[in-house]
Amino acid sequence: MEIITSIEKMQKLSLKFKREGKKLGFIPTMGCLHEGHLSLVDLLVVKSDILILSIFVNPTQFGEGEDLEQYPRTFEEDVEKSKARGVDIIFAPKADEMYEFGFSTQISESNISNRLCGKSRPDHFNGVVTVCTKLFNICQPDFVSLGQKDAQQVAVLKKLVNDLNIPLSIEVGEIIREHDGLAMSSRNTYLNHDERKDALVLSKALDLAKSLVDSGCNKTNEIKEELGKLFKSVSCARVDYVEIVDSETMEFQRKVLSENSLLMLAVWINKVRLIDNRLL
């Protein structure tokens, strides 16, 4: 396995592979890899001649006062995990090369990005879309795998690829959970013992919503009311949003309409913001 930090080297190598007819798989990450990330590697390892995983804590998707400096960085462990799962190249560029002095170009998606996490974290998705466009141009992938846990990000990037005719296909990996149901996340490392137990309220809320729908309740406001009671029972939980949306467009739904109805959660457990989702 090779580690590349130079944008020029990575791009030239990718173009060389393409000329040779090789199929390139790509997983964009910010590191601190867990089984959720590694399951995305598994999705592509069998269909890619060359598998590239990027590790880049992207500063432009963090807002003022967010956890850019605190975000966990575990590069050596990430390298070992990636190698063991069949990654061929780790691309780990430096921020000052990705965003050189005078960098002034930003790409934005103006519909899906404006709600849910986009409303709570202004400019977050502008940073995501811009960095992913750069990474796609540098790494030239045929296949990209993304995690369902970041469902809104998946929808935004699918729209980017479609609108700008970027020649790649996106594959979405299912949410990988801990043994007790908590969705795997790099930010789980911020939780202390008690907060870790309280964080299970997110997966409990998903289960409650599914149970309500299965019992015949399909009105969004009624489901949200019941989930609100559950969240209020956990003293350290503070709801950012609870919404039912179309899984592709992220448009709000007043009723659970079909198998595309997706419950989206963002909840603070004290100072740690967690997200989760489930099809209803």
Image (cartoon, rainbow, N blue to C red):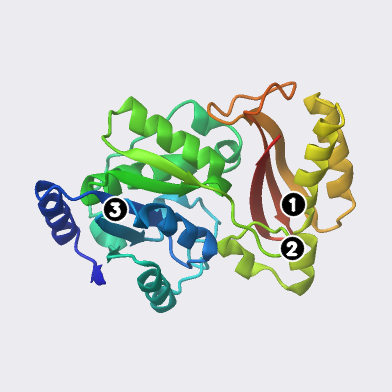
Q: Position of residue 54 (x, y in %)?
A: 34, 59
The residue lying toward the viewer, choosing from 5 and 47, is 47
Q: Is residue 69 above or below residue 235?
A: below
Q: What is the distance, in whole Å, between disc 3 and disc 1 at their CAs? A: 33 Å
**Residue to which mark 1 is pinned:** 203
> Is residue 123 in sight in this rendering?
no
Q: Name the amino acid, label 1.
A: Ser
Q: Secondary structure at mark 1?
A: helix
The residue wearing badge 2 is 180
Quadrant placement of the C terminus: top right
Q: Nearer the viewer, mark 2 or mark 1?
A: 2
Of the numbered discs 2 and 1, the one sitting upstream in the chain is 2
Give the Cα distance between marks 2 and 1: 9 Å
Helix, strand or loop for disc 3:
loop
Q: Are marks 2 and 1 in contact (CB under 8 Å)?
A: yes
Tally the numbered discs. 3
Residue 178 rendering spot, x and y as whole percentages: 66, 63
Amino acid carrying label 2: it is Asp
